[in-house]
């Protein structure tokens, strides 16, 4: 960390070289509603707590240098004070427009911003910001002598409560765009859609080979397709064809710069915010049925038992014969026609499904880790109102597509990393590349899981490393499947896992049990895939290796954009879940304890898995305390305990849409009413607001709130 200048050790003046000064770290600020902050240092370092009086006016998202003033340990947290604000966050804060005479303010109701922002009233009125409207503002300055921050408006979002306003507010909160500039749209419109001799030069022609797409029923862009044909030797030729976005989006152009800035498409509950303009993502680069399309492909010869006999990588042209929804493909798998009555498409689906099963089994034998987490979906109407919450169940048709995408991604990474000959061009393994890597889990945390599981009577093998740890995890989860403690084990196991990131340094992908892995199959929606396509095309043509330093920075940026998009997506889900529960305040439901903290029990409802919090201070029967070492909550007088997975009954107490938080009340007496129907299938939601204050935001009609004067 000293080499990376994230920490430094200073010496002050004094006897014998002086006393040692406290260590200093560089990190990002996570602020709370009450004004104190945590500085996120990263790596294995513990976050540093800073009191509100010692923040030096640092705000959420700022990069700061912080000095540790209390080391922590033995149950106490590390504390520090901000020494310097290195970089102000460019992300806007969302609030309500308020005018006081000639002055204008943006009133905050954010869990991460306790201070209102003064803005230029003339500019605000010129932008059409009416009193009470939701707006986005960036902090420009906060001199030490001033009582509060000042800034400027970046957007007028609209009337509070309107669905578009709230979704745009979430995008603004994460500094994500929701429209393309006219310059980018015009640049996209100028891209030619002609496929002539120049476009076909050097491409393999698969237009006469059976080709099809399988996607969700409501998909609008189709960036991958499969082709299939039987070979005379009894093997199969399987092609994985990916939209050749790199042919249309050239480096350094207007569209490319915008795509790079966005990094990824963003999928909110009710809309997609694409990485590329519509002409590209829904037209030119979408592998639509009965249209000729330019593609970049991996083509395999596979034996009847799933062994890959040969591979080929290169640019192609295809013509999709069919556009299938997952449900249509699943219908063929569930009700296979007799062999003599099968159409070529049905034969392809059934054969590919069989091969996918072989590939999937091989992955798990190699040590792949699979968390059976339900994928939650919120169905909304045309106005964005949530109608129901349901679990999206992945079946064989989903796995069919997944396995061949994984095979394609792995093959591309392995080819670049190990070399060989492709298209007649000798290839050495000295090329710099973009890998998708996933490190091994935290084995100390796995040991904690082993101890936790023993409290329930489970014997988990010692984690060891690599495949042994994966096997121990799989065996534990399999033995707990269907029992109350299963989700508790799975939640803790997930916290043990490293995060997958992009990097030029390949360490393999632990979760998938692949030595080599990249992202090649979604260049319409992920910028790293577009980088991979460009590098691959260059290397296949004998091009020189890319400059590692620049490419590593691109990997770090892509990882950061992916994380921001994921946070925005989760936030939109939380918003719709709270909105879904608003008319259920006062109703009672059964659930299970899904999380424990020093301030509350988190409970997931049985019918929907929607999560809310029961504050410990509001449990009437006793004074409850959190025992972190045994991960349980214990009553001081009664010694009653609450553990993960415990069955409880709750009443919905409050649904705070602005803060996206749900408060539950624990029902301790017997004979409660029957649970209410939520008109919902099984689902799972991310925890809502586990950090920070639970205090509700103030109304838009209050006076501006300034920071207290500091002595």
Image (cartoon, rainbow, N blue to C red):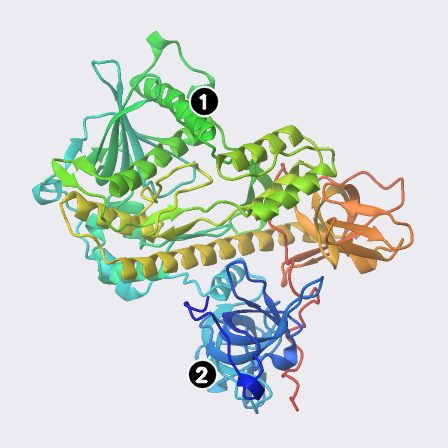
Using the rendered image of the protein, determine whether residue 38 is visible from the camera's viewpoint.
Answer: yes
Regarding mark 1 in the picture, which secondary structure is present there? helix
The residue singled out by tag 1 in the image is 331
**Are the residues tagged 1 and 2 within 8 Å (C-beta)?**
no
Q: Earlier in the sequence, mark 1 or mark 2?
A: 2
Residue farthest right in this picture: 637
Which mark is nearer the camera, 1 or 2? 1
Q: Residue at x 42, y 26 (%)?
A: 362
Dot 2 alpha-carbon crowd within 10 angstroms: few under 14, some 14 to 19, many 20 or more = few
The residue singled out by tag 2 in the image is 123
Residue 666 appears at what percent x and percent y?
A: 81, 50
**Quadrant location of the C terminus?**
bottom right
Along the viewing direction, whichever of 489 and 710 lies nearer the viewer: 489
What is the CA distance from the residue labelled 1 to the residue labelled 2?
58 Å
Q: Residue at x 79, y 43 (%)?
A: 648
What label sits on residue 301 in the rendered view? none
Residue 628 placement: quadrant: bottom right
């Amino acid at each position: 960390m000293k080499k990376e200048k994230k920490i430094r050790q200073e010496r002050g003046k004094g006897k014998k070289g002086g006393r040692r000064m406290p260590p200093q770290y560089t990190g990002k600020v996570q602020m709370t509603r009450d004004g104190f902050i945590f500085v996120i240092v990263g790596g294995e370092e513990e976050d540093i707590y800073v009191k509100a009086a010692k923040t030096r006016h640092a705000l959420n998202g700022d990069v700061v240098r912080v000095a540790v003033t209390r080391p922590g340990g033995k149950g106490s947290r590390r504390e520090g004070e901000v020494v310097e604000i290195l970089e102000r966050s460019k992300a806007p804060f969302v609030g309500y427009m308020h005018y006081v005479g000639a002055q204008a303010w943006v009133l905050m109701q954010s869990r991460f911003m306790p201070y209102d922002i003064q803005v230029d009233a003339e500019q605000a009125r010129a932008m059409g910001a009416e009193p009470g409207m939701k707006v986005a503002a960036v902090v420009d300055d906060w001199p030490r002598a001033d009582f509060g921050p000042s800034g400027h408006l970046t957007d007028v979002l609209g009337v509070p409560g309107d669905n578009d306003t709230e979704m745009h507010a979430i995008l603004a909160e994460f500094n994500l765009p929701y429209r393309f500039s006219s310059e980018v749209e015009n640049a996209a419109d100028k891209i030619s859609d002609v496929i002539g001799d120049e476009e076909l030069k050097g491409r393999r022609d698969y237009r006469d080979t059976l080709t099809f797409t399988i996607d969700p029923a409501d998909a609008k862009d189709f960036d991958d397709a499969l082709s299939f044909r039987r070979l005379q030797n009894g093997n199969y030729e399987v092609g994985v064809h990916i939209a050749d976005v790199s042919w249309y989006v050239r480096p350094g152009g207007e569209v490319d710069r915008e795509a790079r800035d966005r990094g990824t498409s963003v999928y909110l509950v009710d809309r997609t915010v694409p990485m590329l303009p519509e002409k590209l993502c829904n037209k030119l680069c979408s592998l639509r049925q009965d249209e000729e399309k330019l593609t970049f492909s991996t083509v395999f010869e596979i034996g009847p038992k799933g062994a890959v006999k040969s591979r080929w990588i290169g640019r192609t042209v295809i013509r999709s014969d069919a556009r299938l929804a997952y449900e249509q493909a699943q219908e063929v798998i569930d009700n296979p026609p007799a062999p003599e009555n099968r159409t070529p498409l049905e034969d392809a689906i059934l054969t590919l499904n069989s091969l996918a099963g072989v590939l999937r089994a091989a992955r798990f034998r190699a040590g792949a880790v699979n968390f059976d987490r339900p994928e939650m979906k919120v169905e909304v109407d045309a106005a964005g109102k949530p109608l129901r919450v349901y679990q999206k169940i992945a079946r064989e048709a989903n796995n069919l597509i997944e396995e061949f995408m994984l095979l394609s991604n792995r093959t591309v990474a392995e080819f670049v990393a190990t070399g060989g000959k492709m298209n007649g061009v000798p290839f050495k393994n000295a090329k710099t590349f973009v890998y998708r890597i996933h490190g091994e889990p935290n084995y100390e945390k796995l040991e904690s899981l082993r101890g936790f599981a023993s409290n329930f009577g489970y014997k988990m093998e010692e984690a060891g490393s690599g495949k042994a740890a994966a096997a121990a995890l799989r065996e534990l989860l399999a033995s707990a499947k269907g029992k109350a403690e299963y989700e508790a084990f799975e939640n803790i196991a997930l916290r043990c896992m490293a995060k997958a990131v992009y990097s030029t340094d390949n360490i393999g992908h632990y979760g998938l049990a692949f030595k080599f892995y990249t992202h090649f199959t979604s260049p319409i929606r992920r910028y790293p895939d577009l980088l991979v396509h460009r590098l691959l095309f260059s290397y296949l043509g004998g091009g020189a290796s890319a400059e590692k330093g620049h490419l590593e920075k691109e990997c770090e940026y892509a990882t950061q954009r992916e994380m921001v998009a994921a946070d925005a997506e989760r936030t939109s889900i939380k918003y719709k879940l709270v909105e879904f529960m608003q008319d259920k305040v006062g109703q009672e439901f059964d659930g299970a304890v899904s999380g424990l903290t020093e301030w509350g029990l988190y409970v997931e409802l049985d019918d929907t898995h929607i999560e809310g919090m029961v504050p410990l201070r509001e449990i009437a029967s006793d004074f409850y305390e959190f025992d972190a070492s045994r991960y349980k909550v214990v009553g001081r007088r009664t010694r009653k305990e609450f553990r993960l997975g415990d069955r409880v009954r709750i009443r919905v107490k409050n649904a705070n849409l602005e803060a996206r938080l749900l408060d539950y009340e624990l029902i301790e007496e017997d004979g409660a009413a029957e649970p209410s129907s939520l008109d919902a299938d099984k689902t799972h939601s991310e925890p809502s607001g586990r950090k920070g204050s639970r205090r509700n935001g103030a109304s838009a009609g209050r006076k501006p709130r300034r920071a207290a004067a500091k002595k």
